[in-house]
Image (cartoon, rainbow, N blue to C red):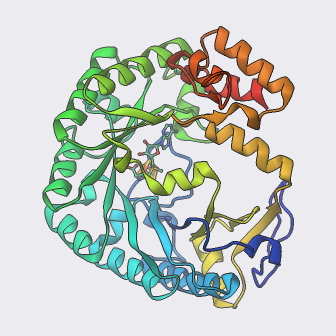
């Protein structure tokens, strides 16, 4: 039997969903997430569900792909009705490590099972060092429409602290190669606030991003995740912990530089040149629509039911080979859970959240937050006092979690 994770209920072994979750399926956007659990080496800050080949003796990319195919077939049986994917996102881990041929096979597996909508957005994450012009040409021809590259920094000593194996210039060069291969939508990920990173280091990273001519940037404050090598180095005193005031200064620096260059925020950690460049797959998460996450440890959400798969690739494959769902556990969100999530996620978006979605008490709190400069006063007031929206100001974006707590 699948083991239940804390907070989850036992998931049915055949993966079936209640009728209530399936109602309206296909009338909302539908996404497919595919989790690739392999990396060449592990970066010291990362706690994603990923393994180096040395750590995995009982699973390989081919056994993983076979298992993902089984899970996609299971998805079609469970959903019971054709729901072509509006978005596909291959994440990891390091999808580019699989090579273009396996990434093509993977996308074909989705096409042949779930199906693809005519205007589907298909993203793959990629690590700069496992890409090349030929790789981008091949995945573009296979139907991928968007590439997201982990750059993190252009400063050599920051990359070294983060255990990144690519050279400082490789990520921006890869972004240019992707654009040359015909990818209109290319994202670069940055991490700011790494111990030892100066404001000048970050400025050079942002300059490199802008010189690469991408239409999307994600910038994340370094999170020290429990159990990582980075957390151990900080605990031992080998590195200082990231400082909250410095992180806030760095966020403002990133926002200022990107905005000046025409990339505007549309989610607290995401900037783009125009709405057409917004990541549709991630927007679907933030809007709480339906997606099926296939692969070890992947999370799914359909009609208010959320579940997550077992993490280990070998266990994941063996559960599917036995004809069972690989879900470890699941939970059914109550109407109140869904309302709280909506506040939490939509507040992070540039369109914000309708004020009248909040309780009377939270509406008062929103007006207080606006008077403190955390929410846009004009947006909260709305036109003639109606149709107000809670939209974070720059100061509010720096304190987004605290604002969410006040409004929930
Ligand atoms: C899970 S990674 C996958 C992409 C790819 N493997 C890579 O590293 O380039 C996605 C992004 O999450 C971000 N990330 C991962 N761990 C993080 C942490 N502890 N703090 C901040 N950002 C993190 C990085 O920017 C990374 O590019
Ligand atoms: S940050 Fe990316 S490359 Fe590094 S361990 Fe995590 S998933 Fe792998």
Relative image position of residue 149 (x, y in whole percent): 32, 50
In the rendered image, which quarter contains the N terminus? bottom right
Position of the C terminus, as image quadrant, is top right
Q: Nearer the viewer, residue 46 or 95?
A: 95
- In the image, residue 159 sits, relative to residue 15, either above or below, namely above
Residue, x 50% and y 86% (percent of image)?
Answer: 66
Residue at 60 percent across and 38 percent down: it is: 225
- In this rendering, the answer to whether 139 lies above or below 65 is above
The total of numbered circles placed on residues is 0
Where residue 310 sits, quadrant-wise, is bottom right
Res 268 visible: yes
Where does residue 302 sit, x and y in percent of width and height? 69, 67
Residue 276 locus on image (x, y percent)? 35, 50
Q: Residue furthest front?
A: 384
Q: Quadrant of residue 340?
A: top right
Q: Quadrant of residue 273?
A: top left
Q: Nearer the viewer, residue 362 or 242?
A: 362
Taking the image as shown, residue 177 lies to the left or right of residue 228, namely left
| Residue 18 visible, this angle | no
> Where is residue 253 drawn, in percent x and y?
37, 18
Whether 140 is drawn above or below 408: the answer is below
> Residue at the location (37% across, 82% down)?
105
In the image, 192: left or right of 307? left
Q: Is residue 204 above or below residue 25?
A: above
């Amino acid at each position: 039997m699948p083991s239940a994770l804390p907070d989850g209920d036992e998931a049915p072994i055949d993966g079936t969903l209640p009728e209530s979750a399936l109602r309206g399926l296909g009338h909302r956007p539908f996404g497919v997430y595919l989790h690739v659990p392999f990396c060449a080496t592990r970066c010291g800050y990362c706690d994603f569900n990923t393994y180096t080949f040395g750590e995995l003796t009982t699973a390989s990319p081919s056994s993983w792909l076979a298992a993902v195919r089984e899970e996609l077939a299971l998805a079609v049986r469970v959903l019971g009705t054709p729901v072509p994917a509006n978005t596909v996102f291959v994440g990891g881990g390091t999808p580019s490590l699989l090579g273009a041929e396996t990434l093509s096979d993977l996308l074909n597996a989705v096409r042949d099972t779930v199906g693809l909508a005519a205007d589907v957005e298909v993203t793959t994450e990629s690590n700069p060092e496992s890409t090349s012009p030929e790789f981008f040409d091949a995945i573009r021809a296979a139907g991928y429409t968007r590439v997201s590259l982990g750059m993190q920094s252009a400063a050599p000593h920051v990359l070294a602290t983060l255990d990144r194996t690519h050279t400082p210039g490789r990520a921006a060069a890869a972004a240019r190669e992707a654009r040359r291969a015909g990818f209109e939508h290319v994202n670069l990920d940055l991490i700011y606030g790494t111990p030892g990173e100066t404001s000048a280091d970050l400025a050079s990273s942002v300059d490199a991003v802008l010189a690469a001519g991408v239409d999307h940037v994600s910038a994340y404050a370094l999170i020290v995740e429990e159990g990582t090598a980075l957390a151990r180095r900080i605990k031992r005193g080998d590195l200082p912990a990231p400082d909250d005031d410095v992180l806030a200064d760095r966020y403002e620096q990133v926002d200022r530089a990107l905005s000046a260059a025409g990339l505007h925020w549309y989610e607290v950690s995401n900037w783009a040149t125009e709405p057409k460049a917004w990541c549709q797959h991630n927007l679907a998460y933030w809007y709480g629509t339906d997606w099926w996450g296939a692969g070890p440890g992947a999370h799914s959400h359909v009609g208010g039911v959320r579940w997550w798969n077992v993490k280990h690739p070998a266990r994941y494959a063996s559960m599917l080979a036995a004809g069972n769902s690989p879900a470890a556990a699941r939970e059914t969100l109550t109407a109140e859970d869904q309302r709280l999530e909506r506040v939490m996620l939509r507040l992070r978006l540039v369109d914000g959240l309708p004020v009248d979605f909040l309780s009377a008490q939270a509406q008062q709190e929103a007006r207080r937050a606006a008077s403190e400069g955390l929410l846009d006063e004009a947006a909260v007031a709305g036109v003639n006092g109606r149709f107000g929206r809670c939209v974070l100001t720059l100061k509010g974006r720096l304190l987004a979690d605290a604002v969410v707590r006040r409004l929930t």
